[in-house]
Amino acid sequence: MSVVLGMPQPRPAAGSSRASAPRGVRPAVALPAERPAASGLVDRFGREATDLRISLTDRCNLRCTYCMPAEGLPFLAPPALMSLEEITRFARIAVTDFGVRQVRFTGGEPLLRKDLVEIIRSVAALEPRPEISLTTNAIGLTSRATALADAGLDRINVSLDSIHPETFAKITRRPFLDRVLSGIDAVRAAGLKSTKINAVLMPGINDHQAVELLEWALAGGHQLRFIEQMPLDADHTWERESMITAAQIRERLAVRYLLTPDDAPRDGAPAELFQVREQADGPDGSVLGLVGIIASVSEPFCADCRRTRLTAEGAVRSCLFSHTETDLLGPLRAGADDAELADLWRGAMWAKPSGHRMNEAGFAQPDRPMSAIGG
Ligand code: SAM
Ligand code: SF4
């Protein structure tokens, strides 16, 4: 049976094999019993992916403790990576066949791709043009920001966990804070929309710097987003007991700032946004800016996930915490046409789990660390 999404469908009878919706999912349409033959990237729980993350490489020039081991990892050989043409083809299928509206390049460190400007230009030429963004550690951004903006890059997220050189070096295992700060300045000079800053807090390392980091971001007009540390480190050292939760982040910020939930619709965004005021000014004080908190562990937002991911070697991962992947690059290189590739991708999305299950007994961390998935 094929079912058209958007058409009313009968509710399943008790005992039916149809999957039940995860907690919090209220599908706007009745759930189809089978995967529709042609549709956007929909799953069994009524979600539709409109946001594509593409990892461009698994290599990186930093070694953040929550992501990579000090000695690095066995990296992919260059021929195993998707080429400019292959990336463009997958992005075209996503945009034209699935209605994907946002494409984010990530890694590893995407600035390590020498052809990054060409990749962005090529994806910016797609019709309809998706919004294009980049998540980067900003090493090497200083000399490339203008070229990236000219090629069609719309937004940049820079990862920065501390503005103290010693703390930065301790977390990233590299003494490159000045390069990151210079990269952030270059983004502004290139005329790109305001930079978002991603920060992971770790107890005893940088959690006591949360207020200072926010003060710095507000002064520079950047939107800071704190991300809860997830069990995606290559060393498998993550411990729930020692991670800084969203509630603890709010507590640390409350020492100086008053946070009020922002009214704007979240619209599938991972970050919960808060308006920031000085505690001393009270609720009628002027809003200094916004801060985001991405509570992937303690307050999961899987029910509203709109993401699909391609690893650097062209495999679909429907969830960061998947233990399975669907290879698209092998079939592409073997001569599959767009319709066959789209069908494989739809199949991978249909199998997307309801949530990461991190808070359930028996959760197992995926083998791949964040750098090899594409965060
Ligand atoms: N190298 C680029 C960077 O650092 O921005 C892009 C790739 S990195 C994997 C993407 C994002 O994932 C970064 O903001 C980083 O802080 C975040 N990240 C990496 N490992 C993480 C973890 N274990 N938990 C939470 N966030 C993590
Ligand atoms: Fe590299 Fe980004 Fe991972 Fe840090 S978080 S090691 S910058 S991929």
Image (cartoon, grey):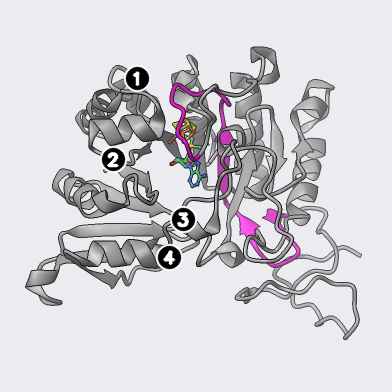
| Residue labelled with disc 1 | 140
Residue 309: quarter of image: top right
Instruction: Say which residue appears at 50% left-offset and 34% top-offset.
Output: 105
Give whichever of 24, 246 is nearer the camera. 246
Measured in 3D between alpha carbons, the distance from the residue under mark 3 to the one under mark 2, in whole angstroms, is 17 Å
What type is the residue that disc 3 sits on? Met
Q: Earlier in the sequence, mark 3 or mark 2?
A: 2
Identify whether 350 is placed above or below 58: below
Residue 156 falls within the magenta-colored stretch = no
Question: Comparing marks 1 and 4, which lies closer to the viewer?
Answer: 1
Question: Comparing marks 3 and 2, which lies closer to the viewer?
Answer: 3
Q: Position of residue 372 (x, y in %)?
A: 61, 32
Measured in 3D between alpha carbons, the distance from the residue under mark 2 to the one under mark 1, in whole angstroms, is 18 Å
Instruction: Please tell me whether mark 3 sits on a helix, a strand or a loop.
Output: loop
| Residue labelled with disc 2 | 162
Taking the image as shown, residue 150 lies to the left or right of residue 182, namely right
Give whichever of 246, 124 is nearer the camera. 246
| Residue labelled with disc 3 | 243
What type is the residue that disc 4 sits on? Arg
Residue 60 falls within the magenta-colored stretch = yes
Instruction: Say which residue appears at 16% left-offset and 66% top-offset.
Output: 277
The residue carrying pointer 3 sits among few (fewer than 14), some (14 to 19) or many (20 or more) residues within 10 Å by Cα, namely: some
Q: Earlier in the sequence, mark 1 or mark 4?
A: 1
Q: Which residues are magenta?
A: 39-66
Q: Main secondary structure of the magenta part?
A: loop
Looking at the rendered image, the quarter that the N terminus falls into is bottom right
Taking the image as shown, residue 286 lies to the left or right of residue 44, namely left
Measured in 3D between alpha carbons, the distance from the residue under mark 1 to the one under mark 3, in whole angstroms, is 30 Å
Question: Comparing marks 4 and 3, which lies closer to the viewer?
Answer: 3
